[in-house]
Amino acid sequence: MSAPLHSIDRPNSYIGRSVTRPNAKRLLAGRGRFVTDLVLPRMLHAAFVRSPYAHARIVSIDSTDAKAMPGVRLIATGENLRQLCKPWVGKLDHFKGMKSSEQWPLPVDKAVWAGQAIIAVVADTRAQAEDAAEAVMVEFEELPAVVDIDAARAPASEIIAPELGTNLCFNLRLDTGGIDDVFASAKHVVEDELHFGRHTAVTMEPRAILADYNASEHQLTVHHATQTPYQFQDLYSRHFGIPEANVRVIAPDIGGSFGMKLHVYNEDMAVIGLSMMLGRPVKYVADRLESFLSDIHARDHRVRARLAMDEGGKIIAMDVDDVTAVGAFSSYPRSSVVEGNQVVRLIGAPYNFKDYRAELSVVFQNKVQTSQYRAVGHPIACAVTERLVDMAASRIGLDPFEMRARNVIPDGAYPCASATGFKFEALSHEACLVRLKAMMNYDALRQEQAELLKQGIRRGIGIAAFVEITNPSPAFYGIGGAHISAQDGAIIKVTPSGDVQCLISVTEMGQGTETIIGQIVAETLGVEREQVKVITGDTEITPHGGATWACRGAGIGGETALQGTKRLKLNILSVAAAILQEKPERLDIRNGQIVDADSGQQRIALAEVARIVYFRSDTLPPDTNAQLTVAHHYAPQGYPFAFTNGVQASYIELDAETGFVKLLKHWVVEDCGRVINPMLVDEQVRGGVVQGLGAAFLEECLYDETGQLTNGSLADYLVPMAVEMPDIEIAHVETPTRDTELGAKGCGEAGTAAAAAAALNAVNDALASLNTSISQIPMTPARLLRALGHA
Amino acid sequence: MNDKMPITLTVNGEVVSQHVSPRDTLADFLRSALQLTGTHLGCEMGACGACLVLIEDRPIHACLMFAVQADGMVIETIEGLNDRGIIADLQEAFHQRNALQCGFCTPGMLVTAYHLVKTDQASSRELIRDGLSGNYCRCTGYEAIVDAIEKVASARKADAGRVASEEVGA
């Protein structure tokens, strides 16, 4: 880093400022363009017949009556769609030995979860398609369902995919060696078994897709509510045999995704096939019940873990066994084992110890598949670690802050690696702990807690330190054979009137991608922010890139925009220099004017340069290379990941009579490197925290013993409401990554990573006065009452 | 079930006469027949609040009402509310405070916020949080929305005369 990028004295200084989002205005005006809203000429609607059983053979299908219903255009089975689409298997090569079965748009022989789409019905209206779907007769032969997390590996268990010969999807062992001896000789050992319920993204806009196949051009256009249009362009091309250049995926406004909308869904692949069969646009929007039944779920882990500590309160080792159940097959193309993999690699990550062993077992079951959802694995790793760290502190009577201060990797110890091999460039756990303690006025809060306890009011304070994986390199997916890009691309151009357009491969879901890219382009070029328009989400016009996931938008997309804009600026100055008969290095751009770099004196307007280049090139010197459009790609280099870190605190009040917990306050200190827009970063953190608190107290996909989801509605599955959530105070420590000039790391998952762990520790802090504890989330009132002995 | 019935209602100040299926919800009618897609469907059971519209100036779930039931009523959706004083203030405050991310819940959120401000149920953060609890948002964590509504409510209270004049103008 040379000159600071956000010197407030400079004109067009936007990086580091809390500017508003230009694209939010259309959403406020009700003028958003969600896939749900789109209508195309001759558009038809799809609905699906779904399996009533968690595991059942499809014996026969009779759609005679359904075909005769009003408005029905097509009824397609798995066998019909199989003719058009190559199958897929949700495996990644770098997960050695992982197994999963072949999948098609719709199943051809059996259903493997309750609610799985079996048959597609296309009609003039959605209501007609649903009417006809009810008239399709499917005979099922019910099979034993694998529901419980332990049942999958029981000796006599039904094997869900007989061709695999096992219900074990993946097994991983990490071992630094000699763990049993370390534990045997340790002064203190604490251990616990923690349970993490299944929950799901619950985006306010359900999944939506509108496929439009045009046979005359062999062209497929898909309006798809997804965060990864390029990934789907590749998949639709390869699986349906359409040249990639003829596949266009447009992701317009997306009503929330949180990772959920970047996976392949059977219905979506079916809709592509249906449009090809009919030669007409076909739209499918999941209703809320369908979302609960078929969106990916996440978590569902049982972790047994122990921690060894010396007599001085120094953590010396951890030993972990994680079992996770991921549904009937591994999700495609990112698989269903990444979460478990990240759990066992992130456990203990903030702390300075070397001895570690972990066993991960990923098993199949007859439920919808789990896969990547916001903060993949982090909340589990963090809760396991932080619960054990609190238990260890309690064992030797140490304050939770002091326990962490003694054990986190010191800020001066970087670069270094975690016990699991993650390479850390520079983290700031110590600085974050100091900042948090002051911000929450910790000592006074402890005093208040003690005073109130005398009156029978049980409050709890919980702390949780975390690291977050961001800016992933090809080590994440590319290495596993998936066509998921780790690089991004941007086209930045000056229009004839001197405005700027930036077409970039990172995508917008409301988090502010377009805004921060606009800030970076405007500041780097030297124009006003209002002159820059950022365009995302269309594979036909933006360069190929990874798009937005794993907290890579700011760090990788931002660096792409920065470096591309620097090249554009050089081009502009080169033309301006030719016009002005000046040396380019003596010129600069400020407020849309080409100026003398030293004096700031105005020489010629950018708009005038553009006018000459586009309309009067005859007046330029003959050999002028006037390139006012630049295409630039950037792939992360250096560390495989840029780690964000931080620490959170939760303050709660427990009603021991009812089991209800009131969330009083939440604090986050977070280090995502260079902060491009403090307001947007804080709002990412707040939203992330609330999703984490939802998981901690409310959200769980509940199944009965036959594998039926029993709470598939927004009245039964609880998401956080405004009245239950606390105000969240946020502060930042900034340790920019030196792998990029921008220095930004991700922040979108930081809130979710540690919120549940902080809450779990806070509730256990309150329960300590009653000599009981809880090690399961969500911490529902019923579970808390059980912990309190009210059976 | 496909026998259509005639209805006449006022939507965003315009009289609309159409034939609708008895099973069409008001939300379906607004979104499909009138292409007023600012009204969103999040749960279709009255839980999430994304479909709230104003009927006779009260927030009503458009997903829980059949279009035929709206015959003769005066309905306003986000598309028609943009010029109204309180809504315009709320939109500006939401924009400044980034009280929205994906924006899918936002039209319904604005309808509730309008009602809270107008009926003086936004005088404290607790009241606002309570009043917003029929509107789900998965992106923001709610705090920015509470901040934005609190700001508008207190500004309008501080200048009651301005409120009166703008309501006449609306």
Image (cartoon, helix red, strand yellow):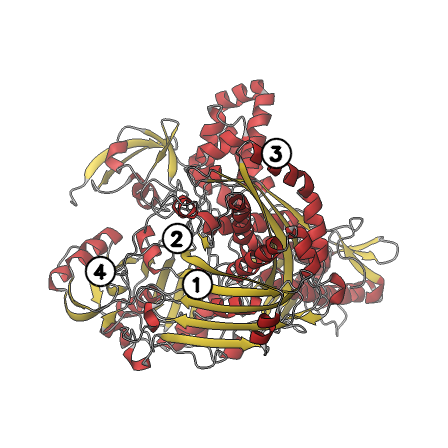
Give the mark nearest the N terminus, 4 or 3. Answer: 4
Residue located beneath label 1 in the image? A302
Residue located beneath label 4 in the image? A52
Q: In front: mark 1 or mark 2? A: 1
- Judged left or right of residue B50, residue A1 is right
Residue located beneath label 3 in the image? A451
Residue A145 position, x and y percent, is 26, 66
- Judged left or right of residue A544, residue A270 is left
Amino acid type, callout 4: Pro
Give the mark nearest the N terminus, 1 or 2. Answer: 1
Q: Determine the image quadrant of residue A582.
A: bottom right
- Judged left or right of residue B107, residue A671 is right
- Judged left or right of residue A130, residue B73 is right
The chain letter for the residue carrying disc 3 is A
Q: In front: mark 1 or mark 3? A: 3
Residue located beneath label 2 in the image? A700
Give the mark nearest the N terminus, 2 or 3. Answer: 3
> For the residue carrying disc 3, how many other residues have a C-alpha within 10 Å: few (<14), some (14-19), or many (20+)?
few
The CA distance from mark 1 to mark 2 is 14 Å
Do pointers 2 and 4 mark residues of a single chain? yes
Amino acid type, callout 3: Glu
The CA distance from mark 2 to mark 4 is 21 Å
The chain letter for the residue carrying disc 2 is A
> For the residue carrying disc 4, how many other residues have a C-alpha within 10 Å: few (<14), some (14-19), or many (20+)?
some
Do pointers 4 and 3 mark residues of a single chain? yes
Amino acid type, callout 1: Arg
